[in-house]
Image (cartoon, rainbow, N blue to C red):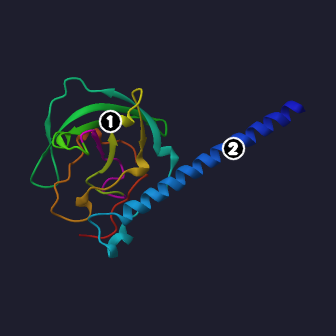
């Protein structure tokens, strides 16, 4: 009887801890999304109402194993405009979502390497099975810094996936995710398709 009571107490404490952690995570993501909308550089004040997100889901926040690329060559990444942008593959992320093993390439921008503020910037563009229906057809982006990769692990949070500027208006050269970064599942997390046509 005593063991059952002890097990019940431990279970309750564990559930309370997990619940508190989830609430902290949800609160931080809610604040992140609010700041994202309020500070958006392209979408005007009257149009911010058309920015929408999927419900926050911890299933889309996963630890990914990182493998650095060896002897990676610079290449011209296609964009939505007439210009290309120069990137190189920095490494590969491997992870699981809904029992599916997936991989994404992480890229480094040649132009940003000379910037004091963005020299350690890493870029993860992707498309998935929601692209062109529920989310922007041209794919979505995730940003990281090299220091976020620790012990060859990176916390990959699709709840922070965002649309490129060309999802809202014309005139930008937004990188198009390479074919190898097309995820063959639906990523129902992060920013949805912009709700206003342009």
Res. 181 in view: yes
Asked if the magenta segment contains residue 171, the reply would be no
Q: Which residue range is magenta in the image?
A: 119-134
The quadrant of the image that shows the N terminus is top right
Determine whether 111 is above or below 94 in the image: below
Q: Nearer the viewer, residue 180 or 71?
A: 71
Real-space Cα separation, disc 2 to disc 1, in angstroms: 34 Å
User: Which circle, 2 or 1, is nearer the viewer?
Assistant: 1
Q: Which mark is residue 146?
A: 1
The residue that label 2 is drawn on is 15
Q: Where in the figure is residue 63, as x and y percent of width and height?
A: 45, 35
Packing grade of label 2 (10 A; few <14, some 14-19, many >=20) is few
Q: Where in the figure is residue 60, as x and y percent of width and height?
A: 46, 45
| Helix, strand or loop at mark 2 | helix
Q: In which quarter of the view is residue 165 placed?
A: bottom left
Asked if the magenta segment contains residue 123, the reply would be yes
Q: Where in the figure is residue 115, as x and y percent of width and height?
A: 20, 44
- Tell me which secondary structure the magenta stretch mostly adopts: loop
Q: In which quarter of the view is residue 87 placed?
A: top left
Q: Which mark is residue 193?
A: none
Q: Nearer the viewer, residue 105 or 143?
A: 143
In the rendered view, does 77 fall on the left or right side of 122? left
Packing grade of label 1 (10 A; few <14, some 14-19, many >=20) is few
In this rendering, the count of numbered labels is: 2
Residue at 48% over, 54% down: 29
| Helix, strand or loop at mark 1 | helix
């Amino acid at each position: 009887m005593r063991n059952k009571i002890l097990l019940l107490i431990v279970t309750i404490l564990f559930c309370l801890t997990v619940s508190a952690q989830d609430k902290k995570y949800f609160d931080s993501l809610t604040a992140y999304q609010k700041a994202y909308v309020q500070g958006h550089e392209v979408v005007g004040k009257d149009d911010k109402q058309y920015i929408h997100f999927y419900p926050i889901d911890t299933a889309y926040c996963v630890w990914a194993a990182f493998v650095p690329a060896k002897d990676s060559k610079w290449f011209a990444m296609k964009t939505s405009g007439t210009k290309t942008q120069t990137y190189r593959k920095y490494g590969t992320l491997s992870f699981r979502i809904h029992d599916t093993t997936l991989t994404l390439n992480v890229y480094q921008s040649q132009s940003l390497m000379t910037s004091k503020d963005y020299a350690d910037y890493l870029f993860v563009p992707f498309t998935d099975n929601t692209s062109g229906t529920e989310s922007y057809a041209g794919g979505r982006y995730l940003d990281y810094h090299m220091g976020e990769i620790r012990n060859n692990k990176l916390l990959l949070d699709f709840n922070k996936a965002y649309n490129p500027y060309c999802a809202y208006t014309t005139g930008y050269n937004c990188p198009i995710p390479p074919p190898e970064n097309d995820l063959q599942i639906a990523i129902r997390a992060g920013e949805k398709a912009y709700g206003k046509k342009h």
